[in-house]
Image (cartoon, rainbow, N blue to C red):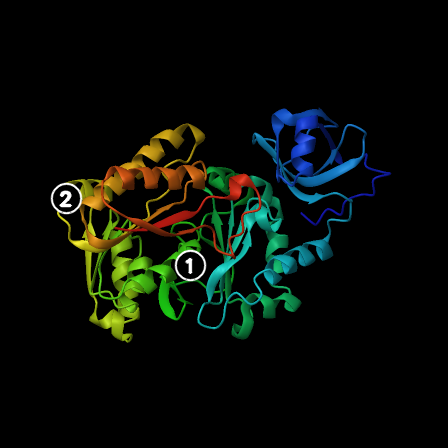
Amino acid sequence: MQFQPSLPPENPAPRLRLKITPTADWKLRSGHPWLYADSIIEQSRAGQLGELAVIYDRHNNFLAIGLYDPESPLRVRILLLGKPRPIDSDWWRAHLLAAVQRRAGLFDAQTTGYRLINGESDGWPGLVLDRYDSTLVVKIYTAAWLPWLSEVKTILTTAPLIPLLSGELGAPSRIILRLSRNIQPIAGRVFQLSDGQILQGPALDGPVIFLESGLRFEADVVRGQKTGFFLDQRENRRLVESLARGRVVLNAFSFSGGFSLYAARGGAAAVTDLDISAHALEAARRNFELNRSDPGVANCRHNTVQTNAFDWLKSHSTPAFDLIILDPPSLAKREVERSRAIQAYQQLVRHGLASLLPGGILAASSCSAHVSATEFFDAIRQTAQQSKRRFTEFQTTAEPADHPATFPEGKYLKCIYLKF
């Protein structure tokens, strides 16, 4: 499938034309990137997966153009709003260049893992692009991107963009495709694509090694969670490093030990990782070994415990740690789970405080988009107050600069730091 240049507004007949409700019109004009099926009041014909749908307002004026998915309630993901222009190869390259340039100056040679495209907030709805050293990982969350993947690959390997994408490392050595679970069946059945497939470059014989703030980490870009690593917690890991000197640290839901490794470099006396996954804990141990040349890492006692972190915290009520990190996976994947998730966060903090020594620091994080920052922070503060312990709140954080959130549903990450 080749790029589909948009037709001029005076000859839109070959295009899929949509008219929408006044409410949807207002939302799109305000910058929201999604159009739902129940907001479409008139459609020129049946649409095909991935085609460019043109949206008109009630006065029959061009409003927007986006990727169409006939099977999803989220029917169109907006690419262009306002004045029409050709959606051709030049437009896509400029679109990528704009996203990459937004990261200019954010990272140096000590950090070679970060996000280059953050979906809707960078104008690429339902698609993210992460860099791990010389490997690029494309993850798509909507089937509407499947017909475009060959063009996406071509754009990513276009020579003028290589210096921006890879800096001093040269051209990307490989491009990996990751697929959201809900689109894997159609990807395999219709497009012969699979999660973890190498779109370009040599096969992998193990994880990709990349740098973050000078620390070496491995990323399982083929089978790992997200695109292989939780790049969005970078700034919180740096903050934990600054708080860790001399402390005994508990890292609940530790995954591959990112917070723990930063704490060790920051001078922590000991770190304990809790995770239910043996695979994740083994990755944490390998990450420590990758950095043993650092004196802080070499001198830090690193313990791993394979367990359900909720159960472990509930059963350990003796104060033993003076820095506790609570970073669970998303506890509210749907709106109906929001209330229960807030209660679960409060329970985690309640049990975590039972293990926190006087003078200790608690860092609590949420990646649940359905729980707002206000709801999360208020819940954690309320739980801290109910403990009857005196505490000081000294910082809250949100998404880092390479994970911008330009619309409400895109705001998901929040972390609060309390000292007791």
Q: Which residue lies furthest to the left in this view?
A: 318
The image's mark for residue 235 is 1
Q: Distance between the residues labelled 2 and 1?
A: 30 Å
Q: Which amino acid does label 1 sit on?
A: Glu
Q: Residue furthest right?
A: 10
Residue 65, quarter of the rendered image: top right
Q: Where residue 303 sits: x, y (%)?
A: 18, 59
Q: Residue at x 42, y 50 (%)?
A: 226
Residue 156, quarter of the rendered image: bottom right
Can you see residue 141?
no
Q: Is mark 1 on a helix, strand or loop?
A: helix
Front residue (pair 196, 298): 298
Q: Residue at x 53, y 75 (%)?
A: 168
Can you see residue 385?
yes
Q: What residue type is labelled 2?
A: Ser
Relative to residue 110, is residue 30 depicted above or below? above
Residue 349, quarter of the rendered image: top left
Q: Residue at x 58, y 65 (%)?
A: 104
Front residue (pair 321, 177): 321
Per the image, the residue denoted by label 2 is: 317
Q: Residue furthest front?
A: 390
